[in-house]
């Protein structure tokens, strides 16, 4: 886990991910577009793809709660719909001042589909916590389990 109280980017992170955290967190400010009439918790996300494209997202709530869409999934859906499937890192922020906001379980599982990428969680003041997806979702379920089942299944005529 990489933690910065100042929001400064560690040189290793800058080289490895080419991910200017201050800029990405500003992209997370799309949280201002959030539609959150029920929770009143505005969340924004910025996604960096392998080829350097940045996709932003915000949460969109619905009275039928399970139809709501989180910021992280919004950003991922935007990237995938534009043909980007290789993700490099994702950042998430909210308007909470006293703590970072981690992705929910559903978002962690969706991120998992695209690999064990770093997840940067930030506070309003720019400080952040970085964790890998494996740290956030240990022993996760993925496509490799489905492929194994297909391989182990007897062939039917």
Image (cartoon, rainbow, N blue to C red):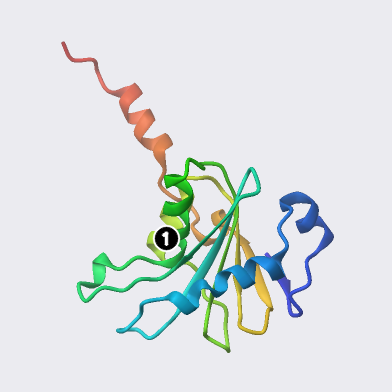
Task: Give the left or right position of residue 50, taking residue 8 as reference.
Answer: left
Horizontal side of 145 relative to 155 (left or right) equals: right
From the viewer's perspective, is residue 116 above or below residue 68? above
> In the rendered picture of this protein, how many numbered marks are placed on residues?
1
Task: Determine crowd level at label 1: few under 14, some 14-19, many 20+ residues with C-alpha closer than 10 A.
Answer: many
Q: Residue at x 78, y 72 (%)?
A: 8
Give percent across and percent down for residue 133. 55, 56
- Residue at x 30%, y 68% (from the top left corner): 68
Residue at the left extreme of this rendering: 157
Provide residue 66's location: percent of width, then percent of height: 25, 67
Give the percent coordinates (x, y) of residue 124: 61, 83
Please name whichever residue, 60 or 119, is drawn nearer the observer in this view of the structure: 60
Image location (x, y in percent) of residue 72:
46, 62
- Location of residue 80 with respect to 32 vertically, above or below: above
Quadrant that contains the C terminus? top left
- Quadrant where the N terminus is found in the figure: bottom right
**Can you see residue 2?**
no
At 76% across and 79% down in the image, what residue appears? 6
Classify mark 1: helix, strand or loop. Answer: helix
In this rendering, does residue 119 appear at all? yes
Q: Residue furthest right?
A: 11
Specify whether 127 is left or right of 112: right
Determine which quarter of the picture holds residue 98: bottom right
For the view shown, which residue lies furthest in the top direction?
Answer: 157
Q: Badge 1 is on which residue?
A: 74
């Amino acid at each position: 886990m990489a933690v910065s109280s100042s929001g400064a980017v560690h040189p290793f992170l800058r080289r490895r991910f080419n991910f200017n955290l201050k800029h990405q967190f500003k992209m997370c400010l799309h949280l201002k577009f959030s539609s959150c009439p029920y929770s009143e918790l505005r969340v924004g996300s910025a996604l960096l793809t392998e080829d350097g494209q940045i996709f932003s997202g915000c949460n969109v709530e619905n009275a039928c709660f399970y139809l709501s869409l989180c910021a992280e999934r919004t950003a991922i859906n935007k990237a995938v719909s534009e043909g980007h499937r290789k993700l490099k890192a994702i950042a998430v922020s909210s308007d909470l001042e006293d703590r970072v906001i981690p992705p929910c379980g559903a978002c962690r599982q969706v991120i998992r589909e695209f690999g064990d990428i770093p997840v940067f969680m930030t506070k309003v003041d720019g400080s952040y916590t970085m964790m890998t997806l494996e740290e956030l979702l240990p022993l996760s379920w993925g496509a490799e389990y489905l492929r194994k089942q297909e391989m182990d299944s007897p062939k039917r005529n």
